[in-house]
Each structure stands twice: as C-alpha cells, then as structure tokens.
Image (cartoon, rainbow, N blue to C red):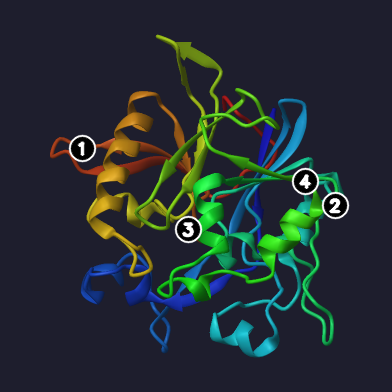
Amino acid sequence: MKLWSIRGNSQKLDGGSMFGNAPRAVWEKWSAPDALNRIDLACRALLASPLNGRTVLFETGIGAFFEPKLRERYGVQEDRHVLVDSLRAAGFEHEDIDVVVLSHLHFDHAGGLLAPWSEGRGPELLFPNATYLVGAAHWERARHPHPRDRASFIPELPGLLEASGRLELVDGPHSRALGESVRFSFSDGHTPGLMLAEIAGPEVVDGQPHGGVVFCADLIPGRSWVHLPITMGYDRNAELLIDEKRAFLEDKLARNVHLFFTHDPACALAQVVRDANGRFGTAHEVAELQARPLAA
C-alpha cells in the first residue's frame, strides 16, 4: 500500500479564530498573518491504495462549490477544483475512488465532494463509484445542526449522500467497507461525533497495531495544535477537546502512529514526541507524500 497527500483548495482564515484563546503575540510566531489578520491553511486529503483492496480517499477539502461571494467570504483562494487536479497529478480520477472517509461534514472537509459551482446549477456529487463513510453520531449533527455551527454545514449534502445509495454510517471501530484495515475512534470536542481514521500499521504488539497513520482532522489541524492548550475558536468544547487530544496523543506516541494533518500548509505527516517537561511536539516532519509506502 502507498500513500499520497492530495492538495485541495487552500484557505485564508482569521488567525484569532484558528487559535482560540491564544494571544496573537504567541500564534503569529507559528503562522504569519496577512494584512487582514488571516493565516494560510491547507485543505489536504490522504489517498491510500490499495487499502483492503480499495482506493481510499480520506476527506475532500473545501472544494470549489461556493458561489464567488461566499468563496471570498471564506477565504478560498482558487476557483477551480484543486483536489480533482491533484488526484489526476497522482494518477487517479475521482471516478477511481472506491471509498471516501469523512471525519465530519463541515464544508472545509466535505465540500470537495461536490462539483464546482456553476451559475444556475444545484450541488452535484462527485466520486460516483465511492462508498461514503460518515460517523453515525455526527450524521445526526449534520442533519440537525445547532445554531452555533449551522453555517459550517452544506444544507443539501445529507440529502445527496442518502440519495446516492452509497452512504455507510460508522458507529464502531470498523466499517463494512474497510474492515480491520482502518480503525475508527470518535471525538466530541470540535463537533459531535468527529471520526478519526487510523490506517492500521504493519506491526501488532499485544494485540494493538503499531506504526500506522491517523488522519487528525480538526482534533489537531496542524503542528501548532499538537500543543495541548491550543484550540480553535470553532471548537464546541475546548476543555473536552484538550482532554481528548491528550488521550489521543498518548496513544499514538505509545504505538508509534504518525499524524496526518489536513490544515497545516507546510507539513502533511509527522511523528508525535514528548519532551522532558511532558509537552507534546512533532518530529520527522514530511511536507508531502508521493506514493510513500506505509512503513517508510
């Protein structure tokens, strides 16, 4: 099996929102803001093939579904569907994808499921041959969002996914589509039922897989957020997220599971480490993956 990091459309968002209660004097050292106080963010997907005999895409980024006015509001930098172009550069078309794994259905993670915006045309799903995996608990949130995060969802998307006949709701550690090759865990600090997908590593110690890769989604958007106190203003429950992040990082450190970041503009993959003071950090950082073997 090989792994690719697949770039989608990039964003610029307010740095204060992305770093929650961290003061600008701290976070601007990690992410330099522009004149509008915005920082650069990637929307990076992970492609794995063959995985359980399938070609699997973990997330789809923000895509190009927004009309021009909303594209500008949310800082989307390109008007074309970059994810589709990046897949093609890696040797794949969107029709080649067998499974799309969605950590959650916020538009910056699921908007790439949709065809680019066109005047007078409603939203249309891409990936016509794929099974779409969504966490069962988060599915209910997407269908009945809270006023605090309603704007983060695409209203038409749940109906399109249901109508496809290819939606699988995941409510445990494994899915029908991927079997034991991918292990799922769940988090509620960012959004209810956020689904974290871990590609099982090649080694098994005491019945636990070691050496895999986990898609961190918005539990840990990038290297800066590995530090436990750093959360986003978009998180529904920052204290819960910190507790979940601590347990998550301790587990990945113990099992040598590498972290895959979706929003870090300069780093796709890193190993989690912890210093003598107990602070988590990253090492062996990799900017992008190009047909990289899992064990490499």
Judge left or right: residue 66 versus residue 183.
right
Judge left or right: residue 179 versus residue 197.
right
Name which of mark 4 and mark 3 comes first in the sequence. Answer: 4
Name which of mark 1 and mark 3 comes first in the sequence. Answer: 3
Up the image or down, 78 lies above or below 279; here it is below
Residue sitting at 34 percent across and 30 percent down?
251
Name which of mark 4 and mark 1 comes first in the sequence. Answer: 4
In percent of width and height, residue 171 lies at 53, 37
**What amino acid type should be assigned to the residue bearing mark 3?**
Asp
Name the residue furthest top: 206
Cα–Cα span, label 2 and label 3: 29 Å
Q: Which residue is mark 2?
A: 128
**What amino acid type should be assigned to the residue bearing mark 2?**
Pro
Q: Which residue is mark 3?
A: 264
Cα–Cα span, label 4 and label 1: 45 Å
At mark 2, the secondary structure is loop
Up the image or down, 51 lies above or below 113; here it is above
At mark 1, the secondary structure is loop
- Which mark lies nearer to you, 4 or 3? 4
Q: Work out which quarter of the rendered image holds the N terminus and state it.
A: top right
Name which of mark 1 and mark 2 comes first in the sequence. Answer: 2
Residue sitting at 33 percent across and 70 percent down?
233
**What amino acid type should be assigned to the residue bearing mark 1?**
Asp
Determine crowd level at label 2: few under 14, some 14-19, many 20+ residues with C-alpha closer than 10 A. some
